[in-house]
Image: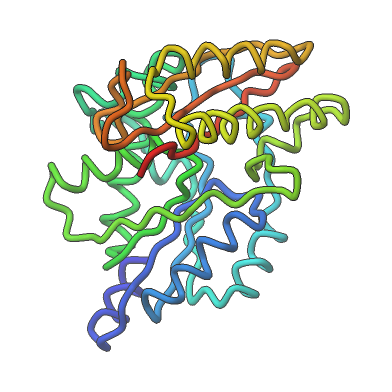
Amino acid sequence: MFAESDAARRAGRRVVFVPTMGFLHEGHLALMHEGKKRGDFLVVSIFVNPTQFGPGEDLEKYPRNLAGDLALCESAGAEAVYTPRADSMYGAGYQTYVSLSDLPNHLCGLSRPGHFRGVATVVTKLFHTVAPHVAVFGQKDFQQLAVIRRMVKDLDFFIEIVGHPTVREADGLAKSSRNSYLSPDDREKAVVLHKALSGARERVAAGERNAAAIVSWARDLILETPGTEIDYVSLCDPDSLEDLAEIGEAAVMLLAVKLGTTRLIDNMVLLP
C-alpha cells in the first residue's frame, strides 16, 4: 500500500483516503465521492479494527461483505483498496498505542472505555501506510472526527481532515452498518433519534438557549418510544465536547440510544 501511494505522490497525484470498517453503504459512497472531488488517487481501507471493540461488544458479529465492498469501491472510482489482516496490523508482542487525554472522557468514551485509544491507534497506522494528502470521515461519528482532528493537530500529521455531512435514510435515520442489526419493529422506532435532534434544532432556532431544557425535552421524547434505552443525550461545544449550560456561538447535540441489542449514535449541529 505504501509503495502504491508513494508512486502516486511521486507522479504528482493527490492521494485521498477514506478509512472504513466495511459493509459499505450509501454513506460510505458519499465519502468516496467527496474524496474524488479532493484528489485524483482515492484509497479506501476496509478493516474491522479489533482494538476499538471492548469486551462483550460486537467484533465477531460485525457485518462483513468484502466482495460487495470491493464492487462498491470500484463503482466509486477508487484506485486502491487496502484490506490488512488483524495479525499484520497487530503482530506478536504489539504494545504501542495512541491515547488522547481529554476528548475521550466524554460521550461514547465513557460507555466504551478504550474505544478511542483503538481508533486513534489504527488511524495513525493507516495514515502512515496510506500517506494521504486528505482523509475524509463522516460527521455521524462526531466524537471520532473530533478525536482525529485533535490527534492530527497534536502529532503534526500533514493531512487535511474533511468531515462529510451525515447521510440519512428517507425518514431521517442516519445510515450505519449497525442498522442491519435492527428488527423491523426497532427500525421503525429508530426514527425517534432524528426527531429528537431536529426538534432540538427547531427549539434553538425559536430562541431557546437553556441547554438543560433542550436536553430534557429530547430525552423525554426518546423515552416515549417503548424499548428505548438512553446511553446519553448531550448538548456540547463542538470542539471540546464539554457540556454546555447555555447555547452561545456554537453547539452540537449528540446522542446514543439502544434499541433492542443495537446501540445507535447520531448528532446534529444546533448552532454552527
Residue 201: image location, x then y, percent: 51, 35
* The quarter of the displayed image where residue 162 is located: bottom left
Q: Residue at x 49, y 53 (%)?
A: 165
Left or right of residue 62, residue 6 in this image = left
Tell me which colouring the rendered structure shows: rainbow
In the image, residue 60 sits, relative to residue 18, either above or below, namely: above
In the image, residue 8 sits, relative to residue 127, either above or below, namely: below
In the image, residue 231 sits, relative to residue 253, either above or below, namely: above
Left or right of residue 11, residue 139 in this image = right
In the image, residue 54 sits, relative to residue 116, either above or below, namely: above
* Closer to the camera in the image, 2 or 262: 262
Quadrant holding the C terminus: top left
Residue 269: image location, x then y, percent: 43, 39
Residue 142: image location, x then y, percent: 42, 38
* Closer to the camera in the image, 105 or 113: 105
* The quarter of the displayed image where residue 114 is located: top left
Q: Residue at x 45, y 18 (%)?
A: 112
* Closer to the camera in the image, 249 or 261: 249
Quadrant holding the N terminus: bottom left
**Looking at the image, which residue sits at the far bottom?**
11
* Tally of marks: 0
**Looking at the image, which residue sits at the far right?**
184
Q: Residue at x 50, y 18 (%)?
A: 233
Q: Residue at x 25, y 87 (%)?
A: 12
